[in-house]
Image (cartoon, rainbow, N blue to C red):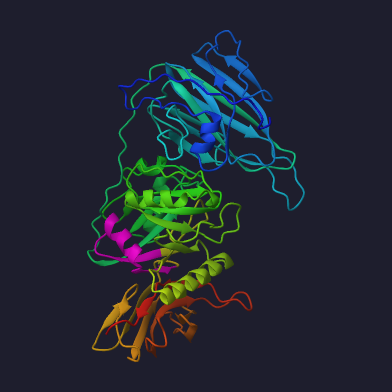
């Protein structure tokens, strides 16, 4: 297959009285304008002539296909082709779905061509859009599994995890292929589409988690805001994640599947007085990942753009309109497409610690600290730090690390407000607790994320109390760098004080670190705080 096929404009039937009626389809040129990244629409797969087998089912002039009709109300088409190196980010395969379809089932396979060391091999993602179209940010999205599954189905009463149950209406659906990487020899693929006919069935009304749990009133609450289940590329069920969260001593979690909302209604019966379940999405673009944290149920945020398309700001605002936070995830991860390239101007917080502590996290932490210095210098708003596990499967530990938030109550609104304000610290487990603040001048005190207003030369005492960190050291970091370090008691519990002035330190934050494992590198974090700012009018 090549990209030089004849553009095709599929037809659909529309009912102007039906608000769910399909939108007018987009021709290839329209698709290129309607989506931010480059995209390609293949020729359609038609089932109109399935009964006599006269349609070859091919996707374009250089693909081949096969047709199979079964006597039990199924019709199948198989499409084969090859994507060349330099293919667009998304390739859409239109499927003409007739009336009377109960279920659409799709499977696919591709050749993982051997490549020399240092050369990227083949990787192909998949998802689907219904008859409402592939418009960027539109209503047609019906599911995405990336490269985590080789098959999926959708019908009114049920769908494969990662996909949205609902009627299979007549019109032009689009299978979305995402060539993540393509080998120099190209990416041979095969897509099989099966339509099953019969009564549509009833779509159950989703039950979403409540926005409030009993909690402990104003208190510090522990949470893990970046988790994956079987609804994307994780291996745990929602029930297993909820159980792991309780075992880790968490008070809240955030559901954050890659590019899908299918898990939003999958938490029935798993919340309780002791566990608040927030819902969101990990928006997984080709230029970095971002967690939409605590959005309204059912909020879908598109991911089909790159930094050069200048569309991220639009979708960041959409996250906030839905009540959520915009949190760039693992900004210095080395996996392809993971490194954050959109800048931090739209971020409400940033994930500086992702899973077990690594040099990637150390770089993220240093970059965040540089941003703090810049915000102080320019008197501009600062971006709080947070940490999450990004746990996918065993042995990934849910709650390593966890963000500990000071909130007025255990509710969606209070938790997101606490994170946005930076009233939080990050710890490797629920065994680690911190208390951190600064006092001075007329008895004033400021805690994490707050400002101690005092004259430039006012003596200020910074105090850190720690439990659960045996063998660790405490570090106080300012806009000049690390100015104070001391070993904690062998028990891992103790208090540390340091004195300074606002003239000497524009902010102070604390880190608790394990002994260095690699000579010349700092030890892994056990905990870190957001800053306490010093200065301003007393």
Residue sitting at 71 percent across and 42 percent down? 183
Specify the quadrant of the image occupied by residue 441. bottom left
Q: Is residue 426 magenta?
A: yes
Specify the quadrant of the image occupied by residue 158. top left
Specify the quadrant of the image occupied by residue 432. bottom left
Q: Is residue 94 above or below residue 247?
A: above
Left or right: residue 281 versus residue 251 is: right
Residue 398 in percent (x, y) is at 45, 57
Left or right: residue 160 versus residue 210 is: right
Region in magenta: 403-427
Q: Is residue 279 above or below residue 173?
A: below
Quarter of the image with the N terminus is top right
Residue 406 in percent (x, y) is at 30, 67
Which of 243/138 is in front? 138
Which of 462/434 is in front? 462
Q: Is residue 465 magenta?
A: no
Quarter of the image with the C terminus is bottom left
């Amino acid at each position: 297959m090549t990209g030089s096929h004849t553009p095709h404009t599929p037809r659909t039937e529309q009912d102007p009285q039906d608000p769910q009626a399909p939108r007018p389809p987009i021709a290839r040129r329209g698709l290129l304008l309607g989506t931010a990244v480059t995209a390609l629409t293949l020729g359609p797969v038609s089932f109109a002539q399935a009964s006599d087998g006269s349609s070859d089912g091919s996707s374009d002039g250089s693909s081949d296909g096969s047709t199979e009709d079964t006597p039990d109300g199924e019709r199948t088409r198989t499409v084969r082709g090859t994507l060349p190196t330099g293919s667009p980010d998304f390739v859409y395969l239109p499927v003409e779905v007739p009336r009377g379809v109960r279920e659409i089932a799709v499977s696919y396979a591709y050749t993982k061509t051997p490549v020399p060391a240092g050369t990227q091999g083949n990787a192909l993602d998949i998802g689907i859009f219904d008859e409402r179209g592939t418009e960027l940010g539109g209503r047609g999205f019906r599911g995405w599994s990336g490269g985590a599954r080789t098959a999926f189905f959708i019908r009114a009463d049920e769908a494969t995890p990662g996909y949205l149950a609902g009627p299979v209406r007549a019109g032009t659906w689009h299978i979305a292929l995402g060539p993540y990487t393509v080998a120099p020899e190209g990416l041979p693929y095969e897509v099989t589409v099966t339509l099953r006919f019969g009564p549509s069935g009833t779509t159950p009304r989703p039950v979403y988690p409540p926005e409030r749990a009993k909690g402990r009133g104003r208190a510090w609450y522990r949470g893990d805001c970046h988790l994956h289940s079987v609804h994307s590329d994780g291996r745990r069920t929602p029930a297993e994640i909820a159980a792991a969260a309780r075992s880790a001593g968490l008070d809240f979690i955030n559901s954050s599947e890659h590019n899908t909302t299918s898990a939003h209604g999958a938490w029935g019966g798993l919340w309780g007085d002791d566990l608040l379940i927030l819902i969101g999405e990990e928006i997984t673009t080709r230029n970095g990942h971002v967690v939409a944290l605590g959005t309204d149920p059912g909020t879908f945020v598109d991911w089909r753009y790159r930094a050069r398309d200048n569309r991220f700001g639009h979708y960041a605002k959409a996250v906030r309109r839905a009540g959520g936070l915009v949190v760039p995830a693992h900004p210095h991860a080395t996996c392809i497409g993971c490194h954050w390239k959109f800048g931090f101007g739209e971020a409400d917080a940033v994930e500086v610690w992702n899973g077990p502590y690594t040099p990637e996290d150390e770089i993220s932490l240093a970059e965040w600290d540089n941003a703090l210095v810049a915000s102080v210098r320019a008197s501009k708003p600062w971006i709080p730090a947070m940490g999450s596990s990004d746990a996918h499967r065993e042995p990934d530990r849910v709650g390593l690390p966890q963000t500990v938030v000071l909130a007025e109550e255990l509710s969606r609104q209070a938790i997101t407000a606490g994170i946005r304000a930076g009233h939080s610290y990050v710890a490797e487990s629920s065994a680690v607790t911190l208390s951190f603040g600064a006092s001075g001048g007329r008895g004033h005190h400021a805690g994490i994320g707050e400002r101690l207003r005092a004259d430039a030369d006012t003596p200020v005492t910074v105090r850190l109390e720690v439990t659960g960190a045996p063998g660790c050291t405490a570090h106080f970091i300012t806009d000049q760098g690390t100015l104070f370090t001391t070993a904690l008691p062998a028990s891992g519990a103790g208090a540390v004080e340091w004195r300074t002035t606002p003239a000497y330190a524009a902010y102070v934050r604390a880190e608790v670190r394990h002994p260095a494992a690699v000579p010349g590198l700092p030890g892994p974090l056990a905990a870190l705080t957001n800053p306490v700012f010093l200065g301003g009018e007393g």
